[in-house]
Image: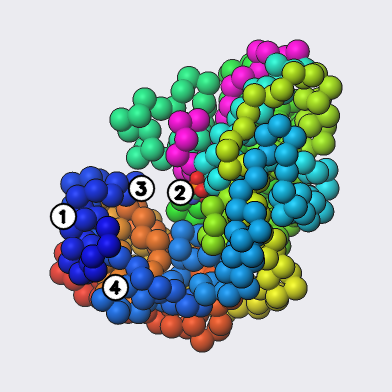
Amino acid sequence: MTETLTNRSLIDLDRDHLIHPVASFRGHEAHGARVLASGDGMWLTDIEGKRVIDAFAGLWCVNVGYGQDSIVEAAADQMRRLPYATGYFHFASEPAIRLAAELTALTPEGLNHVYFTQGGSESVDSAVRYIVHYFNAIGKPDKKEFIALEWGYHGSSAMGAGLTALANFHRGFDLPYKWQHHIASPYPYRHPQGHDDAAVIASTISALEAKVAEIGADKVAAFCCEPIQGSGGVIVPPVGWLKAIREACDRLGILLLVDEVITGFGRTGPLFACEAEGVTPDFMTTAKGLTAGYAPMGALFMADHIYQAIADASPLPVGHGGTYSGHPVSAAVGLEVLRLYREGGVLANGVMVGERFAARMEAIRSHPLVGDVRYRGLLGAIELVANKDTKEPFAADLSIGDRLSQMTWDNGVIARCFANAVIGFAPALTCTPDEMDIIFDRVQLCLDQLLDQADIRAAI
Ligand code: PMP
């Protein structure tokens, strides 16, 4: 298509042809697309010239902000030299090898092997496939059941969406599969003893033990969790929770798959959230911040003992692979992003601006609509409630999420507005303290405007 498209025709063509992720088809037709045209630092500009500040790093991924020229150069150089190399048939490319080596030097001790994917869903899907393969390889073919958390999100592949426990991803898709089980989330705000960290941790551990006992320890393959549940509404478990989970998995003889697709690459402070708890999972899934959204790529890290067991048991090819595994352009992007995190000061800036983030999150706690404030590093959420004392949620027909989504856009800020009145934040780690203030001033304005609406006043 060569003719110049007007903004209106772009929106019409989108409506007629483009299927959007996680959208009601008719709902999107009625709403129309918000077409983004360019990005610079923390800022996005749409095709009408409207500028908004992005408090969500695209989709929890653009951790280094928009417009990083050194990444563009790295991608262009690699495209000119070698745009594609397969990993099949023993082929490889230099960026993929270097990225594998640099990453495994930074992952928790013992995670020395990596399989590159196209994103988070494929990382999770690959983990499940390798876990099944591993138990067959070591002669324990009955260990095939997986346990995950309510409110968890693990991607949109059939297997990952089944491990997910968000109704939207199951409805109409015949999920979860019968080998996929869920236990209650460590959700302090909605936990009867939420103020007591030890009690929250203990309740997950006893739920896990009970579920393993119910299924049979000889049948359970793995427990799968995010260190902080992102798409479920940024649910932050108490410090020490993941470590307790690691110990419980060892005791129960099951593997631990930690999904760091959101929490990886500095989002919560350290490079990986596992690091803060001194935890080495058996499998760790990542994506998003790996390439900061500049090119699609995910990485699945596999512990040495798993790798060695598969290597010893499977002389035949392990039948798992993708055309774009270890894609050289994505790998070149990943290498430059990793350099920016460490030598470019991006991780350090994230930790520094995390203080302003925490201060502004704490300040918003007193707003009449805010029931809960939760965060770690530059990942956080506020939960709005109809009654701060009883924690009563807003009625679904008030469509708070949709309203906030429009209001934040109208007020020039992008945040993730969940249907259950949770607003999620994941600004780029390059954000400045002043930009953080702009984000929170605008969010505060949205909350005040919401509070001014007659039906909301009546509901609280
Ligand atoms: N796991 C987690 C924890 C995620 O947050 C996501 C994406 N939001 C995924 C898996 C799936 O990643 P992708 O969308 O890149 O397939």
Asked if disc 2 is less than 8 Å from ligand 1, the answer is no
CA distance for labels 4 and 3: 21 Å
Mark 3–mark 1 distance (CA, rounded to whole Å): 16 Å
Asked whether the viewer can see residue 179, the reply is yes
Tell me the magenta residue range: 139-159
Find out whether the residues at labels 2 and 1 contact each other: C-beta distance under 8 Å: no
Residue under pointer 4: 47
Q: Is residue 138 magenta?
A: no
Which amino acid, by three-letter code, is at mark 3? Pro
Q: Secondary structure at mark 3?
A: loop
Instruction: Quickly name the residue at label 1.
Output: 30
Disc 2 residue type (three-letter): Gly
Task: Kindly tell me whether mark 3's CB lies below 8 Å from ligand 1.
Answer: yes
Estimate the spatial distance between the alpha carbons at disc 1 and disc 4, rounded to whole Å. Answer: 19 Å
Estimate the x, y position of residue 85 in percent, counting from the top left: 65, 45
Query: Front-most of 27 and 148?
Result: 27
| Colour mode of the rendering | rainbow
